[in-house]
Amino acid sequence: MTRWLVKTEPDECSIDDFARSPDIAIVWEGVRNYQARNFIRDMTVGDEVFVYHSSCKHIGIAGMVTVVRDAYPDPAQFDSKSDYYDAKSTPDNPRWTAVDMIFGRKFPRLITLDELKVLPQLESLALVRKGNRLSVMPVSDDEWQAILSVR
């Protein structure tokens, strides 16, 4: 099992969206960065994922979800009405990947970026490094435990 962190804008897909329908998988689509896409391709059923709210007033890790479907071609890339449409992507040669995830738990409080930045175990985590805008990233076992210790 691998562990991950995904960043999302809460008005687009938040931990509350997962919590509202805890038994229904949500398609994690719309990632349009090649490095993040490659990480999504590595996601498999059972992987645990931190949900990080970004581009909002209160940023930080809000909870956890679990991957319930291995990576597959992102359906939004073929939908011309979608914000994530990619005219260069074809069913025979898809460029983008999605996974399905299901609610795990919402944390009692947000674990803020400021709290994460001071943890020495996270100095290698892309999230806390300056200039990093990656929306999907792996989290090592030590980093995972360090983050959980903050709650």
Image (cartoon, helix red, strand yellow):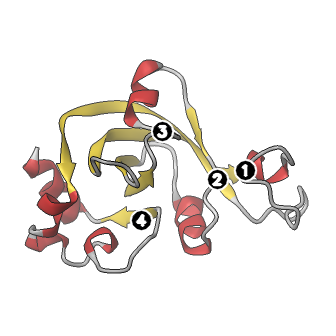
CA gap, disc 2 and disc 4 = 15 Å
- Determine the image quadrant of residue 106: top left
According to the image, label 3 marks what residue? 11
State whether residue 140 appears in this view: yes
Please name which of the two marks, 2 or 4, marks the residue nearer to the observer.
2
Apparent side of residue 142 relative to residue 80 in the rendered image (left or right): left
Distance, label 4 to label 3, CA atoms, is 21 Å
Residue 137 is marked as 4
Quick one: SS at disc 3? loop
Q: Measuring from the top left, give residue 69's x and y in whole percent.
A: 58, 41
Position above or below: 65 against 19? below
Residue 131 on image: x %, y %: 37, 80
Q: How many marks?
A: 4
Q: Verify CB contact (< 8 Å) between mark 1 and mark 2.
A: yes
Q: Quadrant of residue 5?
A: bottom left
Q: CA distance from mark 3 to mark 1?
A: 15 Å
Q: First in sequence: mark 1 or mark 2?
A: 2
Which amino acid type corresponds to the residue marked 2 in the rendered image? Gly
Q: Earlier in the sequence, mark 3 or mark 2?
A: 3
Relative to 17, residue 79 above or below: below
- Could you tell which of marks 2 and 4 lies nearer the N-terminus? 2
In space, the residues marked 3 and 2 are separated at their CA atoms by 14 Å
Could you say whether the residue bearing mark 1 is in a helix, strand or loop?
Answer: loop
Q: Earlier in the sequence, mark 1 or mark 4?
A: 1
Residue drawn at (44%, 29%), measured in percent from left and top? 18
> Is residue 75 rendered to the left or right of residue 46?
right
Q: Which residue is mark 2?
A: 30
- Residue 132: image x %, image y %? 39, 76
Report the disc number at residue 83: 1
